[in-house]
Image (cartoon, grey):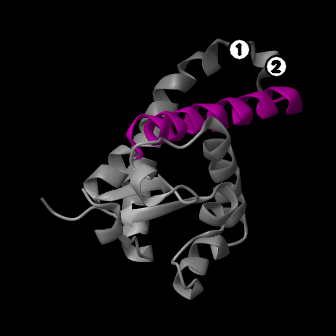
Amino acid sequence: MNVISMDAARLPRILGAIFYDLIIVFAIIFVAAQWFPLVPVSLQNTSSMILVKQLYMLGISFLYFAYSWKRGGQTIGMKSWRVKLLQDKLPQKEKQKKPVSWRQCMVRYLVAIISWLAFGLGFIWIIFSPQHKSWHDMASDTRLVVIPKA
């Protein structure tokens, strides 16, 4: 595939991939949270246990996204919608060959959370950005492209 011929992914396609990935992340968290009932009842609703559970779920979802992005630049939802994550600051020939770094994955994940907490403004930014990049694309030096049909 020629990177130059790939167009920037637009918001509707990205939201479609996000919806697919949400279903998968909920299923993964459901399975990963099976140990929660094993915590003694006296500790269940303490603020520290609630924080541990939230951080655990964020960590599990981060691992799903980061592993997918590192492995091939695509989550399952991104594959379904033909969207791929590429590094943005590399020469054209290397963009598809070199996977994103763990640092880029972490920055992208954390800024995406901030984008959602800001009522989705980081995603809506794609509409106004000349390069069709979200806040987390800009922060992590990555971009989402549409993979042409074979």
Q: Quadrant of residue 147?
A: bottom left
Place residue 117 in its image quadrant. bottom right
Q: Are marks 1 and 2 in contact (CB under 8 Å)?
A: yes
Residue type indicated by callout 1: Val
Task: Indicate the quadrant containing the C terminus: top left, top right, bottom left or bottom right.
Answer: bottom left
Front one among 61 and 138: 138
Tell me: 9 left or right of 38. left
What residue is pinned by disc 2? 43
Residue 61, percent across and down? Answer: 56, 38
Looking at the rendered structure, the secondary structure element under dot 2 is: helix
**Residue at the (29%, 50%) spot, across then down:** 79
In the image, what residue occupies the spot 72% across and 70% down?
A: 118
Residue 36 picture location, percent across and down: 63, 21
Q: Is residue 22 above or below residue 139?
A: above
Rendered position, 53 above or below 68: above
Placement of 32 over or under 83, stated as above or below:
above
Q: In the rendering, at what x and y percent does residue 75 appear?
A: 39, 45
Q: Residue at x 60, y 44 (%)?
A: 105
Neighbor class of circle 2 (other Cα within 10 Å; few <14, some 14-19, many 20+) is: few
* Mark 1, residue position: 39
Main secondary-structure element of the magenta-colored stretch: helix
Q: Residues within 10 Å of mark 1 (few under 14, many from 20)?
A: few
Marks 1/2: CA–CA distance: 7 Å
Magenta segment? 45-73
Tag 1's secondary structure?
loop
Can you give x and y, in whole percent of width and height, for residue 38 in the image?
Answer: 64, 12
The amino acid type, in three-letter code, at marker 2 is Leu
Tag shown at residue 57? none
In the rendered view, does 28 fall on the left or right side of 150? right
Residue visible at 68% across and 29% down? 56
Q: Quadrant of the N terminus?
A: bottom left
Q: How many marks?
A: 2
